[in-house]
Amino acid sequence: MQNLNKNNFLFNSVSSVKGVGLKLRKYLKNKKIEKIKDLLLDLPYEVTDRSKISDLNELEIGKIATVKVMVLKYNFPRIRNLPNKVICGDKDKKIDIVFFNSREGYIKKVLPIGKKIFISGKIGYYKKRYQITNPTYIELENNESKIAKIFPKYSLTEGITEKIYRKLVKQTLEKIQDDDDWHSQQFLKKNNFRGLKETLLNLHNAEKKINIQSNDYRRLAYDEIFSNLITLLSARRIVRIKKKKKKVHNNKFANIILKNFPFNLTKNQKKILKDLNDDIRSENRMFRLLQGDVGSGKTIVGLIVAANVIESNYQAAFMAPTEILSSQHYQLAKKLFSSTDIKIELLTSSIPHKNKKEIALKLANGEIDLIFGTHSLFQKKIKFLKLGFVVIDEQHKFGVKQRLDLAKKGGNNCDVLVMSATPIPRTMMLSFFGDMDISRLREKPKNRKDIITLIKPENKISELWPFLKKQISLDHQIFWVCPLIEQSNKLDYSSAKKKYDIIKKIFPGNVGLIHGNLDKSEKKIVLDKFLKKIIKILVSTTVIEVGIDFPSANTMIIENANKFGLSQLHQLRGRVGRGKNESTCVLLYKKNLSENAKKRLKILKSTNDGFLIADEDLKLRGHGDILGFQQSGIKNFKFADPIHHKDLFLLAEENIKNIDINNIKKFETLIKLYDRAEIINEIAN
Ligand code: ADP
Ligand code: MG
């Protein structure tokens, strides 16, 4: 066990490396390299090949090359700001070697007239002649071996030369101890993994042609997944270890709400409600994710549980990512709870300061039972008398750390429910939400008709006008989504503003525009108009992506649909199809769709099932294109890739079962390597 401390130098500051002074340390910090392990886990992204010696007539401008030339002539202008030049040549051609800020003496020493020299650097072209400016390497003919053949290339920031950086990495690589691995030899062997030192040596060795499927890379990916799982499961253990007071209730308020709710709950909603009610009644804290496709009816479930929590004499908080959404939840709750004496409030940043203070006071002395709001609910100055339940809606941007902070803030008696519409493929579930229990709402309310999805080229846009006219005459409403607000010549996006002007001319008096640059009150005015059906068409950027509920909107037009990810399109489409009318989603695309884009649009056309779409999405994406996950706000891994390392995810899930999560000391170095230690320390306190 003491062995584990051998590699502790990994967590020392880079300033402990020989040659790293204040200045270099600052540069490294800009690259987010502060500890030695950061240096080692920053893998080269490319290889510079200087092994081939090029003739001067086969040079490529802009590429790095090594040439073997004869030094012919000096050209030292001796005028300030003009560089010194040395003209060299081989059998075919001449090349200028250009030096800024180098003294004549030095130049004469490294490039003696008449000698054959190896010079390596980036090839430029100036006044009809090749040149190399400030060459990286200059070596005499008999020193060929010193021009190392192939170099790893790191994403450097200005101020650090490749040579210095590589030297730092090399120094630290040598210090790694390989005899204290957290994996057993047997495990390593079975999976074709190597010890940490060898793994890292290989990954930094440019001659090893590493890729994402190389065993060495896979070892890092596995370690990353595994440390993530340990963290999640530790979090899970710690949240549950402290017992809470059971919440006693008889569905008194819940039944009232249900009476006021115009629909019957689906079977699936009822089943989930039962689980949630069991959670709040139990002495274990609820720490649960309710995953349900857009429009599946999560809100009512959250509100009913809140009603039961309030009945058992606790306060409940309902948090949403935007003010618009919060205020919509608040309005709904006011209606549903109207015949009760439950005190409900809305706290957003746009309400007057005086009211805010009053609300804060009432939360602290228990006069408010149910509060709606955004992140503002979790400011330090907001205190609850007896918080028993927190619901976080659509808040998939919450990482493990934030979830834990929240649980902590709520206190030991606070149950936590996170509601998300982000469909995560089944294989990824544990890796993302292993700290929580999971409920899935898969059944949609019965009154829903599937959304009909059409795919159309943008040049046939005028075919839409009669269709839209008809929808408007039927008192239906329309979303029109454009990717960007300002026309950008560089990116071929449509502009919402421009589109708004066009549509306004066709449907005068019926069109509104909403985009990210409007301030909150302006946004609210437009959305209110749309809610009250004063306007029928809402042209917007993707701001409507969050779960606003407009039951009479039944048409969604998405421009440049091929520019969106599958999940994002599905979320957007989910804004319609919430009422009883048949709904349509039109995906407009510009000509020349890529094969991949075609497939994506087809999938969307063929199904309305968010979970299926998520799985397909995963299949379609290639490496380096895991963007959908980032877009959807789910934290990505640095090395592990959900597509290419699916087997490693499964392996890690299998192996974690054999770990005693109460005793994770053995994995301390591993957890620290991937920055999870802070989280674990946090929860342990
Ligand atoms: P989401 O899961 O995306 O948050 P919402 O909770 O906003 O979905 O619900 C979408 C719409 O479905 C709302 O208008 C809501 O009133 C309605 N709804 C919820 N449950 C049912 C049900 N059982 N039957 C019919 N409509 C329902
Ligand atoms: Mg919702």
Image (cartoon, rainbow, N blue to C red):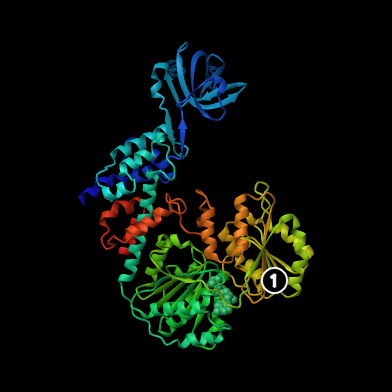
Picture coordinates of residue 437 (x, y %)?
40, 69
Q: Residue at x 37, y 51 (%)?
A: 222
Give residue 262's position: percent from left, percent from top: 58, 83
Is residue 445 positioned above or below 255 on the image? above
Q: Is residue 20 visible?
A: no
- Residue displayed at 55% across by 74% down: 444
The quadrant where ligand 2 appears is: bottom right
Classify mark 1: helix, strand or loop: strand
Q: Which residue is the site of mark 1?
A: 477
Residue in the picture at 46% in, 78% down: 271
Dot 1: few (<14), some (14–19), or many (≥20) neighbours within 10 Å? Answer: many
* Residue 572 visible in the picture: yes
Position of 208 relative to 405 (above/below): above
- Residue 163 in percent (x, y) is at 41, 32
Who is closer to the viewer here, 240 or 532?
240
Residue 326 spot, x, y in % from top left = 54, 72
Q: Residue furthest left?
A: 2
In the rendered structure, the answer to whether residue 573 lies left or right of residue 149 reads right
Q: Is mark 1 within 8 Å of ligand 1?
A: no
- In the picture, residue 477 is in which quadrant? bottom right
User: From the viewer's perspective, is residue 586 above or below residue 224?
Assistant: below
Q: Quadrant of the C terminus?
A: bottom left
Please tell me in which quadrant of the rendered image residue 243 appears. bottom left
Extreme residue in the top direction: 114
Residue 266 vertical placement versus 115 (above, below) = below
Q: Which residue type carries mark 1?
A: Gln
